[in-house]
Image (cartoon, rainbow, N blue to C red):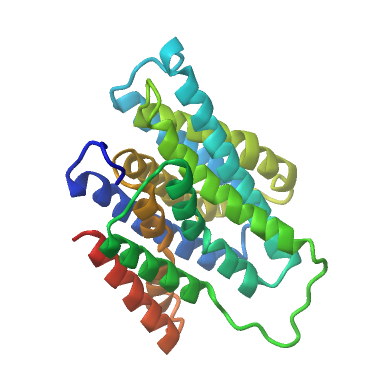
Amino acid sequence: MSPGSNVVPLYVWLTPALIALLLYGLGQGLVKKWIGEVPPARFCLYYVLATTIVNLGFFIMDDHPPLLAASGLGFLAFGVLAYLFDGAAWILYFQSIVLGPVAIVGTLSAAYPALTIVFARVFLRENLAPLQYLAVTLVIAGCLGLSYTPSGGDSQTTSRRWIPLSLLALVCWATSNTIIKYSYSLPGANEANLAVCSSIGGALTLGVFGLLRGRRGTHSVRAWVHSFVPMGMMAGGSLGLIIAARHGPISIVTPLIGSYPVVTLIYAAAVLKERITPLQYGCIGSILTGITLCSV
């Protein structure tokens, strides 16, 4: 962490980060299971609804300064800005998946923690110990390996627009995480208020996208359950990120939470009966080693 920053117990930020990792991983596993029944835009719409319920519940139950207090308007503005970038990243990611090869797009999206570290070092002056840099490198390498899937020779792309779209998604995710950490340095910073910012930013981006693209088709009870349950888990993961980013170095928090594909992979193997390859076993080992080193 940067010189002069307050030292907090490890569990204060590591625990919510690991909970977020677990919730993101399980939520993504359920999305993988039910994606054939619910279109991606519908997931975006339900994600906004789920995050609103989770975030407002946390806001009501947790002590917080007045949301619109004059001293905290800067924090509020940067909080909403962070989640505008986050929502834009998801939209760009969905568009790039449609237009480009999923193997490459997925690998690019998994690299955003590396860019977050660069942003945190340049803009936030955040420094890590050599062992922490090693841990983060192992986690990012493992995520990249898990996201890599060799594509067949018959893969088709409808447009090369997926290249700038996927790169913009990567930049937006890294920017969002960096702004979240920066916002906590401003007067009036509070996790509960940032949760409200998350809902506002999500509604203005993913909510609008979901309304425009996800309203068509039937909205059965089965579709609601199969989309709302995993999106509720993702919303809980987002709340874990909000809490972890307050107290921990974003250079570690982001790669840790970003390693949720390892949980998804284990879920897919145990529940969906998908086979784990030797490469994936090696990536899981790399991520677990990195997580262990981060906690030392």
Q: In the shown orientation, is residue 155 left or right of residue 250? A: right
Q: Position of residue 148 (x, y in %)?
A: 54, 76
Q: Quadrant of residue 287?
A: bottom left
Residue at the limit of the structure toward the top, as seen here: 70
Is 100 above or below relative to 192? below
How many numbered circles are shown? 0
Residue at the limit of the structure toward the right, as seen here: 158
Residue appearing at x 63%, y 67% in the figure: 105
Q: Position of residue 181 (x, y in %)?
A: 41, 39
Q: Position of residue 246 (x, y in %)?
A: 33, 38
Is 250 above or below relative to 154? above
Q: Position of residue 241 (x, y in %)?
A: 38, 45
Front one among 289 and 99? 289
Q: In the shown orientation, is residue 293 left or right of residue 147? A: left
Quadrant position of the C terminus in the picture: bottom left
Residue appearing at x 22%, y 44% in the figure: 12
Front one among 39 and 24? 24
Is 132 above or below relative to 231? below
Q: Quadrant of residue 63?
A: top left
Residue appearing at x 43%, y 72% in the figure: 141
Q: Is there any visible trace of residue 45 in the rendered image?
A: no
Residue appearing at x 26%, y 37% in the figure: 5
Front one among 255 and 120? 120
Q: Is there any visible trace of residue 148 in the rendered image?
A: yes
